Every structure is written in C-alpha cells, then in structure tokens.
Amino acid sequence: MQPLPLQSDWAFVAGNLDLLFDGTVFTVGLTATSILLGFLLGFPAGAIEVYGRGPLKRAVETAGVVLRGTPLLVIMILLFFGLSVSSSAFVTATIALGLRSAAYQSQIFRGALQSVDEGQLEAARAIGMGRLQAIRSVVVPQALRRSVPGFQNEFTIVLKDTSIAIVIGLGELLTVGQNLYQGGQSTAALEIFLTVSLIYFVLTFVTNRSLDYVDDHFSIPGGERA
C-alpha cells in the first residue's frame, strides 16, 4: 500500500484532533492526580525531615534518596509488571509519578520550612503556643507561600514525565500520537509529533503563567522568597 501524499499529512493530523484532545485530557488528569498524591506525601515528608527525629526521619530520608535516584521508567515498570500494584495503568502511573514527585516535593517543602526564621517559632512559643500549633499556624502558611516557585517547576516536570506512561500502554498524549502514525495510515510522523509538542508547550506555558499569578498573589509582602 502506497503512503498518502505528503500534502495530506497535516490534513490527517487535523482529522484526528479529537483523538489528540482525548490524549491531552488524559495527560492533564494524570498530571493532576500525580501532583496531588505527591503533595499529600511530600509535604508531611518534608516536615518530618525538618522537625522529625529518630527512625522515622531516617526512613523518610532514605525513601526520598532511593526514589530520587531511581529512573521513573524503572519505577513505573516495577510497579506495573513486577509488583502489579494495580491492574489499571492509570492508577499505576499515578502511583509511580506521585511517589517520584513526593520525593522532590519533600525537598521543596523542607527548604521552604527551613527558610522561615526560627525567631518566629520562638516568638509563637513565647506567647503560649505549643510547638505543633506554632508550626501549623505560623511556619506552615509562610512555607507554603514560599514553596510556589519550586512547586511550579515540579508541576512542569510531572506534566512532561506523563509521557513515560507510554511504556505501560496508557493512552496519554504521546501514546495517542504514536498510535496514529504506526498504523501505516499516513506519513505524518513529523507533523503528529510537532502537534504533540505544541500541545505540551501550551499546557506548560498556561501552567507556568497561572502559577506565576498564584506566586505573585500569595507572596509574603516585603518578605524574601525561598
């Protein structure tokens, strides 16, 4: 079967925009769930590294080092084919991306917590607050504000890393793009991946501009950012 003429390649892409849109929605959903899981695990982990002690602190630090030092591709394959944590590729990808993100988010939050002057914690204790209450009411709100720039970078990384889910057959954006040209229906490989790249760029750009607004809106007046 002869390949379609080159001039039809962009028409082929245009005719399959609905499939690329579905892949984009899938990618956005995977990014959101992974980031949320990373936050739910990463913030407590960062706090434990700053304020914890003993075996729990060492366990959290060790887990972080292992996750940050292991390629995401290996984590995803191990969870899906090795440990079979779920029969759902989406759930497995969320866990893999979430765990890896948690390891990095813990360092973002650790740095943000440590950037809050110790004098503020001592002042809160001096007016009768308990240590936990002082951390929760005085330190954490400032740390969350100061963590936005680092969180912005992590969000962008996770968004792009969703493409690795292709190895477990998840129908995210890159997988959809690859499936479109591998069927031999078109010679539009370049056009498809240019379109996929453009979609990733738009998602990244919109995310970065949105988080820039959040950073400006919630920045500490007159304070230094971490």
Image: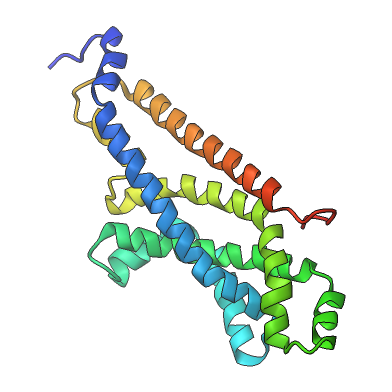
Q: Residue furthest left?
A: 1
Question: Residue at the spot x=35%, y=67% of the render?
Answer: 79
Residue at 28% over, 65% down: 81
Q: Whole-percent x and y of residue 165?
A: 36, 51
Q: Is 28 located above or below residue 151 in the figure?
A: above
On screen, residue 116 versus residue 88, left or right, reads right
Task: State which quarter of the image contains the N terminus.
Answer: top left
Which picture quadrant has residue 107? bottom right
Which of these two is toward me, 48 or 77? 48
Residue 204 rendering spot, x and y as whole percentages: 52, 39
Q: Is residue 180 visible?
A: yes
Along the line of sight, which residue is nearer the eye, 19 or 194? Answer: 19
**Can residue 187 be spotted in the picture?**
no
Q: Quadrant of residue 129?
A: bottom right
Q: Is 74 positioned to the left or the right of 115 in the image?
A: left
User: Is 76 left or right of 182, judged from the image as shown?
Assistant: right
Which residue: 26% across, 11% down? Answer: 8
What residue is rendered at 28% in x and 38% in y?
22
**Which corner quadrant of the image does residue 56 belong to?**
bottom right
Residue 101: where, in percent of width, then height?
A: 52, 61
Residue sitting at the far bottom = 54
User: Residue 27: percent from the left, percent from the top?
Assistant: 37, 45
